[in-house]
Amino acid sequence: MLLWMCCALIGLWMTLRDIPGRYDARRPLPELIALIPLLWIPTTVVLIVAVSTSAWPQSIVAAALLCAQLLWHSAMYVKLPKALLRIYDLPDHLESPGIATVPPQSSSTAVPDDGAGIEEQRPTLKLMTLNCRFGRADAQSIVQLVRNEGIDVLALQEVTPHLLHSLESCGIRAELPFTVTGEAQADDNGGSNALMLRSKPSASSGSAIDIPAAATPTATLTIGGRQLRFASTHPKSPGRGGLFWHRGIESLGALDSAAGLPKMETVILGDLNSSLYHPVFRTLLRTSAFVDASYQLHSGYHRTFPSSWRYVPPLIEIDHVLITPGLRPVSLSTSAIPGSDHRAVIASIRLL
C-alpha cells in the first residue's frame, strides 16, 4: 500500500507540469513544478524497493513513471521529432527564420564575413548573466570572470549601488565601460537590474517593458551592420507573490513585440525564476519568437540554483539566455561566484 501511495503521489506531482498555464500561479504550485526534474530520484527509490520486494504491479507503474520522466529529460540532450515535441508541449520552432534586420555591413565590432557562408566567420558575442543576491556577489570574482571569458555583455540582477561601486573599484570599466541600469521603482525585488557592455550602445532604456518586478533595462548594439537588443530582467520569485511571478514571465514576450520597440534580434538574460517545466514559461516560448539557448543546444541542463549550499550542487535551471531565431547559441556554461546563491551563466552566441 505504501508503494502504491508513493506512485500515486509522484504521478500527481508529474501532472502539474501540464496544468493550464493560468493555474500555475497558485502557490505552492510554482515551487512544486520547479522540483519536477528531481522526481527521478524518489521514483528510482520506489522502483528499487518494489523490485526487491517482488511487488511487480508497483514495479511496472514506477518504471512507467520513470520512463516518462526520462523522456522529458531527453529533450535537453537530443533533438526530438516535432510530433513528440507537440505531445510534450515543448517549443518546436528551433529552425525558424531570423527577424528581418538591417542588411549586413562592415563593422569594427564584427568578425568579417567574406560571403563564403562559413558560420565560424560570422560575428560571435560572449554574454554573461548573474543574480547578485541582494548585491552580495563578490565584485572581484565577477570582474575576474568577465576578464577571463572576454565577456561583451554582462547582465546583472539584484544589483545595489554598493555593488556597482565595488565593481568599478575592481576595474570593471576597463572591460565593460558602458552601463545601463534599470530605473529604481517600488517593485524592485532584491535590487535593480543592469547591463554592462564592451561597446557603446546606439540606444538604451532604463525600463523597456511594463513588468511587476524590477525594471528591465535594454541596450542596442550594432554588430555586423545589424542591430541587437539586450535585456537584463528578473521576474519576481513565487515567494513574492504567485500572480506577480506569473505576470512577470508573461511580460517578457513584450520585448519581442511591444508597441514602441523596434523589431530586431533580441537577447533576454536573467534570473527568470522558471524552467521548461513551468507552463507559463513554455507558453512564453510558444507564443513569442524567443528560444531558450540551453534547450536549443541540447547539451543537457545548466543548473544554476541554489549554488550556495555546501556539498550540494545546483539543483534546478532557472537562469536563462533567451534569443530570437536570427541568433544561434554556440556554447553555454555556468560558473560559481562567491556571495551569490546563483551560478553565473556564460553564453556564446553567433549571428546567422
Image: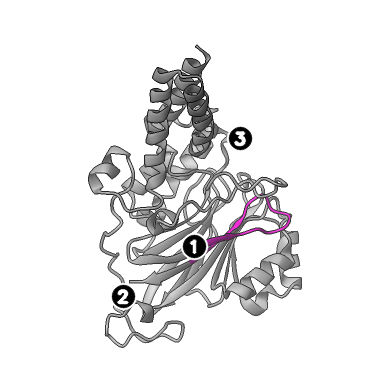
Looking at the image, residue 198 sits to the left or right of residue 225; the answer is: right
Query: What residue sits 75% from the left and 66% below the top?
Result: 166
Could you say whether the residue bearing mark 2 is in a helix, strand or loop?
loop
Q: How is the image coloured?
A: one colour
Callout 1 amino acid: Leu
Q: Nearer the viewer, residue 162 or 123?
A: 123
The residue located at (48%, 22%) in the rendering is: 50
**Of 224 and 5, which appears nearest the observer?**
5
Q: Position of residue 49 (x, y in %)?
A: 52, 24
Nearest to N terminus: mark 3 or mark 1: 3
Q: Is residue 326 above or below residue 147?
A: above
Real-space Cα separation, disc 2 to disc 1, in angstroms:
27 Å
Asked if one can make out residue 23 in the rendered structure from this viewpoint, the answer is no
Q: CA distance from mark 3 to mark 1?
A: 28 Å
Question: For mark 1, what is the residue?
Answer: 332
Q: Looking at the image, which is closer to me, 147 or 84? A: 84
The relative height of residue 227 versus residue 192 in the rendered view (above or below) is below
Residue at the spot of label 3: 239
Classify 10 Å Cα crowding around label 2: few (below 14), some (14-19), many (20 and above).
few
Tell me whether the residue at label 2 lies in contact with that at label 3, contact meaning CB atoms closer than 8 angstroms. Answer: no
Which residue in the protein does label 2 denote? 102
Q: Could you say which disc has been placed on residue 166 in the image?
A: none
Residue segment shown in magenta: 332-347
Q: Position of residue 15 (x, y in %)?
A: 40, 28
Q: Point out the tag, 2 or 1, that comes first from the N-terminus.
A: 2
Residue 309 location (% of width, % of height): 70, 45
